[in-house]
Structure formats: structure tokens, C-alpha cells
Image (cartoon, rainbow, N blue to C red):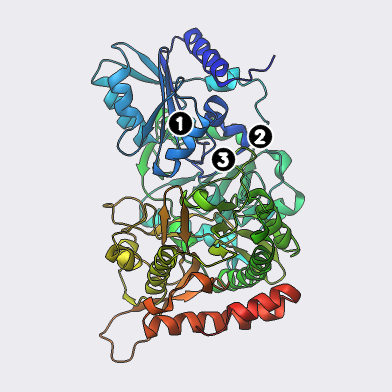
Amino acid sequence: MLMQTHEARLSALREELKKRGLDGFCVPIADPHMSEYVGEDAQRLHWLTGFGGSAGSAVVLQDKAAIFVDGRYTVQVRDQVEERLFEYRGVPKDNPADWLAENAHEGAQIGYDAWLATPGWVRTTAAALEKVGAKLVPVDGNPIDAVWQDQPAQSEAPARVHADAYAGRNAQEKRAAIADWLTQEKLDAVVISALDSVGWAFNIRGGDIAHTPVAMAFALVDQDGTAQLFIDEAKVSPELKQHLGNAVTLRPRSEFESALGAFNGKRIALDPEYGVAAIAQALEAGGAKVVETRDPTILPRAIKNEAEIDGHRDAQARDGAAVSRFLAWIEAEAPSGKIDELTAAAKLLEFRQKDAGLADTSFDTISAAAGHAALPHYKVDEDSNIPIPPSSIFLCDSGGQYFNAEGAGTTDITRTVWVGPGEPSTEMKDRFTSVLKGHIAIAQAIFPEGTTGGQLDTLARHALWQAGCDYAHGTGHGVGSALGVHEGPQRIAKTTGSQGGTMEPLVAGMICSNEPGYYKAGEYGIRIENLVLIEEREIEGADEGTWFGFENLTWVPLDRALIDTDLLSPEERDWVDHYHACCRQILSPRVDGQAADWLERHTQPL
């Protein structure tokens, strides 16, 4: 009989731990590639606790347990996880290592899955336990897998060729550049374990993780440019074999761990953020010297070439037409009070699917009405779903993955709209306009070479700060080229030392989101998100050096009903008018009927 309650699942896990001589176990949301989003078979935390967020972890002892989430999920975790089973803990204030040090008894053996943890996490947690006389030990096979009776099978989706016309650079050139880097750094080989890095380096895509078109694989690239790709044989087509060529040896994924033992005396590069502890341990057991350094594909992957940029522009125009049709529909139908959040999300998907180039959405659509819009990472489901109330704010954050003859690209857009009848409150208009002023400030920013996202972030918050308001998330993240909707290393956010990408210099070719927001708990939320491309700017009379600005990529009108034009400067009004004129020019050939009328009205000068 399947275990239906989370209490039964927790009890079963504790029994399994007893059998293994373990006093506790750490449960992250993770896969062996440290992916942001993981496959259904890797949703161990969700199975154990009921928590459905994309980031979090739990620690289970025999007599107590705790779940750790960040501020995005404070409300969600309380809705989904029983407090009598798991203590609620908020990160970064609390963390699993400190909690274990406080609650594990002397001599305790705390298990962890080395395929789901980074070397840094292992060092930190082991050190915390050592202080109280306890020990962190790797498990042989994940104990949750032993008790999860209906665990989904791993994806069998085929890998596919990502055409050079999409990529703008062939895979042989990319691996030659990796080989040059290895030579320069005096390294013998590099482990590439992040799925989007593997996809980029070999020009392959797949369908193993929802919303992110990647194939489950590991890679080893040697100093001579040859490579081994560890991927399940069933995923490999003759076309893919021909594409990879003779310089790439295909091996079953199951042979990856043993292959790591063949580098005795060699210096092997491993990214400490994406290379899990099991990889480092297998390399060291085989006599290799592990050199922790950034994956050499990450920065080149972030700097898009012209083919990738062109594909992205095309995807944005297609996506803008779909979102505009959706917002025209919302304007017409939502004031009735008969449209709920799930219906709205389904309708948006329907509009996107009218484009044959849509392969998938780029993340789960955030369709958020009223107080739900105040939850930046709200995820609607059958339990949380509510009607969109008349006379309220509706927020929708969504995106698509597009592959078509004109190119390939990944989109991400948030629009906040007023649902009639009536008018938004003065406060709503004030807050929306403050968010818009921050959005415009980023869009218009000019900055010198070497500028980081952390240095720009204040521009987005300035107007809100003047009103005593702020938002708890970053202002911008990187976006992949027909890959992950979140991509490093760049990030526009409050400076947090050297961590989190805020200290990464912004360079031409990077794509970022521009998404300031405001959230009034329990009432409404506002976010305006476009994607922007960093480009070089010629400035007459400028000092020597290279200067950058942003090219806007996303084209969907802003809701005029929420703009207080008296709060905008003349320059800001001009920006809005110019933006709307561009929306009309780009989208008019792509929409008709109700959407065309909506577009015409919403792009008139302020």
C-alpha cells in the first residue's frame, strides 16, 4: 500500500535510517547537477513534506525535523507543511548546519547524499557537527528512494541537436576554447556537470526537466579538446552521434562515477557551485587533484552572439503578441468575476500555443490575483486558486521557450494590470508609478566598463525608497539562449559581497531581466519585468573607455490605468511614449481583432 500521509512517509524514512545506523538525514531539493529546477524523480523534499517551492531543504532526526526556506516561501511553507511534523526555519537567518549542531546528540551519525550536495556544503556542515561530537556521513543510495514506493522514473526524453544556426558557434569551436583555457590554467581536464553548460558546450538540448530544454548528461573535456559525454544510450539518435563527431566519446551515464577514477596524478577542474561532492570524492579517491574553479563555459554562455541575440529578438516579438492577446482578453473578461487564476494561466498558454514555435513555457506561470500578487513566487494550484476579483490588481509573470526557423530564444515577462470596473486607488497608482520609475531608471542607465549589477540596483529602488518602500527580491537575473530562464553569472541585486553574481561585471551580450516590484501583504503586488540586452554605447564627449547601456527586448504595453503621469518627469513620460510606439510597431503586424484594438488604445501617448 502506498503511503498517503506525510506523517507516514516521515515514519518510514526514520525506520530506514535506523536500519542504516543513521541518526538523521539531510533532504535538499537537488539533482546531481545542482539544477535550479529538478525532474519529478528528484522531488524528494516535496514527497516527504508536501512543500512545492523550488528552493528549500529539510533535516530529519529520529525525534524532530525542520524545514528551511527563504523569504519567498514563508507563507507557502505554512500552507503546505504540517508544523507538528517539521519546524519552520527561515534562511539565511537559520541554516541546516547550525540547526544540526544544536539538535544532534554527541556521537550522532547524520547522513547525506553526496550526489545532491556541493563540496562547500559538506565542509560547512561537517565542521558544525564535529564541534558537538557528531559526524556527517555519505549514504550509499538515497534512503528516501528506498521508501518512495511510487517514485517517478527518470525522464527518457531524447536529446536533440541544437542547430549551429541557433547557437551561432559550432560545438567544436566551443570545446577548442575550453581546451585552450585548460592549457592556460595548467589543468588536464574539466568536469562539466551543470546541464545548461553541457547543452551549451555540445550544442545539444533535451526534455528531461520541465521548462528548461536540457538533457541529463555529464561531460569530461580534456586539454586536447576531446571529450567524453555520459548520457543514457536511449537518448542518443544517429543524428546526434553524427553531430557530436569522432572527438566526442559517448558513454552510458552509469559509467561516469567509475570514469572519474582514471585521473591519477592529474589536475581536474570542478566548479564548486555545480560539481557535487560525490564527483570531488570520486576524483580524489582515484588520485586526482581537484581544482575548484568556475566552469569555463559560464561566462561565454552568458555573452550572447549575434545569432543568439537575433533568435531572442524574434522570440520576444512572438511572445509579446501572445501576451498582448492575453491581456486584451483579461481586460474584457476578468471584470465579470468569473475568471480564476488557473483559467487565466491556461488561457495564456493557449495564446502562446497558437505559435508553432513554442516548445514549452520557461517556468510555471505566476497567475496571481489580489493578495496572491503580494507573493513574488506564488504558484497557483487547485487548492490555492481563487477568482480574479473585479476592481483589483492582477499580476502575471510568465515566459516561453521558442524554436523556429527564425531562431531560438527564452522569454520572461511580468505585467501588472488593473481589473475593472472602477479606478485603482491613489496608493496603487503611486506604488505602480514608483516601480515604473525604477524600471525606467534601469532601462536608461549608462555605465562604464567594470560596472556590476550590485552598483546598478539602487537605481531601481530609488523612487520606492523615497516613499519608504522596498522589495525583497533582486532586480534582475541573467537569461539563457533557449536554455534556463535564470542564468548566471550576472545579477542586478543588492550587493552581498562576492556572492550571488552582484559583483560580476556587466558586459555587452549579456541578457538580464529588469523587474523592480512592490508588495503589500494580503492586498496586492506590483512587478514590471522586461528583458534587456547589454550593448556598447557611443557617447559624444565621453572620457576614454568603454561604455554600456541596455537595449530593450520585451514588447508588451504597460497598463496606463495604473500610471500617475503627474509623478513622471518629462523624460520618463517620453520613455513610456517611445516604448509604447515601439510596441505598436513591432506587435501590430502580429495581432488582429480584439487584441489589435487593445494594442491601439494602450499605446497612445500619455
Q: Is residue 268 visible?
A: no
Residue at the image point whose x is 34% and y is 13% from the top? 108
Amino acid beneath label 3: Val
| Location of mark 1 (residue) | 278
Q: Nearer the viewer, residue 289 or 345?
A: 345
Q: Residue 424, position in %: x, y?
A: 49, 65
Q: Nearer the viewer, residue 354 or 368?
A: 368
Q: Residue 278, position in %: x, y?
A: 45, 31
**Badge number at residue 38:** 3
Residue at the image point whose x is 66% and y is 34% from the top? 154
Q: Quadrant of residue 265?
A: top left
Q: Where is the N terminus found, in terms of image quarters?
A: top right
Within 10 Å of disc 3 (Cα), the crowding (few <14, some 14-19, many 20+) is some
Q: CA distance from mark 3 to mark 1?
A: 18 Å
* Of pointers 3 and 2, the one earlier in the residue sequence: 3
| Location of mark 2 (residue) | 154
Query: Residue placed farthest to the bottom in the image?
Result: 541
Q: Nearer the viewer, mark 3 or mark 2?
A: 3
Q: CA distance from mark 3 to mark 2?
A: 11 Å
